[in-house]
Image (cartoon, rainbow, N blue to C red):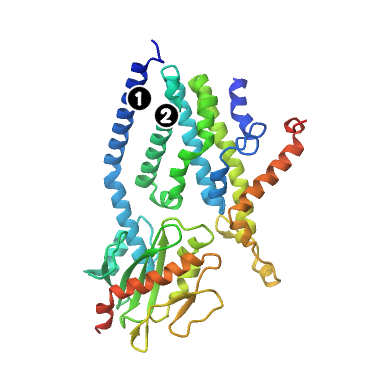
Amino acid sequence: MNTSSNAYTVSYVAVMVIIVAALLAVTAGSLGEKISKNKEIDNKIQVLASLNVESDFDNAEELYAKYVKREIAFEGEKEFNVLKKVIFECEKDGKTYFVLPQEGAGLWGPIWGYLSLEADKNTVYGAYFSHKGETPGLGAEISTPAFQSQFVGKHIFKNGELVSIAVVKPGKIDESKDYVDGIGGGTITSQGVDKMMLESLNCYKDFLTTK
Amino acid sequence: MSKNSNVITNPLSKNNPVIVQVLGICSALAVTAKLEPAIVMALSVTVVTAFSNLVISLLRNTIPSRVRIIVQLVVVAALVSVVDLVLQAYMYPVSKQLSVFVGLIITNCILMGRLEAFALGNKPLPSFLDGIGNGLGYGLILIIIGAVRELLGSGTLLGFRVIPEVAYEYGYMNNGLMILPPMALIVVACIIWVHRSRNKDLQEK
């Protein structure tokens, strides 16, 4: 057969593309349910992480059902693309906590996280951050416990105003609100976390200011 | 049989895709700030090179030569997409860690290089082995660079602290420069330097 004729080339490519498209469609279709289920479990792991509950793929659903009592749907000005805009009402060791999803932008792509507050809706109980593609070793350090644990015990209100928590250059101080150290070399991502928290918390302002 | 084993061992040293042919430098730079992604990337590339070599070798007599690059790209892209989906479905934590790097395999020049230079002209079995050999040769360098950069840049290996706390108390500091991409190139250059000085036949006259 003449493999360099035009007709052969065109039909070869056409058939190949159809076969590959079909193959990918079948794979994506058959795995789609499993993948979205995985993503759901992953979100639950993240919510639990902000409550300082360690979980893995096997026990996340069970622990989630144990601690998270209610999801309160919420409206706010800021658009969320990655996470659901809901408030998770949780109970751990007889105490109530509220988990607030956060979403913003880092240097290369979206960053998001969950902040858990104690029943006073002011004191931070735990924080969890993650990102799509920040630089490993620099911006990506926001997803490490070393960064996240700094938030514990900080307050999002100062003198009755919702001011969020500042992420500052290590060594700097911010008089106007509680602050944590940012990531050296990850300035844009640190500023992203700062902005994300301020904007996201403002979404929940009505909820946070009603006692 | 010894010819087949040569196909695997050659790319590990004398014909290494990264330090001799200088291919795949881009991803060697992107994923080596830490050791763990470097290892997973090495494995993924090995799987994809091996199977794309196999598929192209099976099709080699039917592929119209004018569109062969397109055919190669489609095969590689399809394989990578399938690998990505399978990882997401069955090894979600791993796929989350790799994130964009899986997609980056498509743009790895080693793949196109091997398909073009080897798979188009050889039988399926040697092609498959050639893919494995080149994937391992690439992975070996990646792991060396990843280990050096993580050790000197973060003081850890695979996330475990290697440099003792005592050293920090006496004023030792992690070299933050190691985490930045340019240091990957400098480490590659050092490896090439050592490799060439040990292999006289690689040196240009």
Q: Name the image quarter holding residue B110.
A: top right
Above or below residue A40? Residue A13 is above
Looking at the image, which is closer to me, A23 or A118?
A23
Q: Name the image quarter holding residue B4.
A: top right
Q: Which residue is mark 2?
A: B70
Looking at the image, which is closer to me, B164 or A74?
A74
Amino acid type indicated by mark 1: Val
Q: Chain of mark 2?
A: B
Residue B31 visible, this orientation: no
Query: Farthest residue toward the front?
Result: A6
Q: Quadrant of the image for the C terminus of chain A?
A: bottom left
Q: Residue at x 34, y 65 (%)?
A: A47
- Measured as percent of width and height from the top left, residue A176 is found at 44, 85
Residue B138 visible, this orientation: yes
Q: Which residue is mark 1?
A: A13
Q: Secondary structure at mark 1?
A: helix
- Contact flag, marks 1 and 2 (Cβ < 8 Å): yes
Question: How busy is the neighbourhood of tag 2: few (under 14 within 10 Å), some, or many (20 plus)?
Answer: few
- Measured as percent of width and height from the top left, residue A56 is found at 38, 58
Query: Farthest residue toward the top?
Result: A1
Q: In the picture provided, is B196 more to the left or to the right than A192?
A: right
Q: Residue at x 63, y 29 (%)?
A: B10
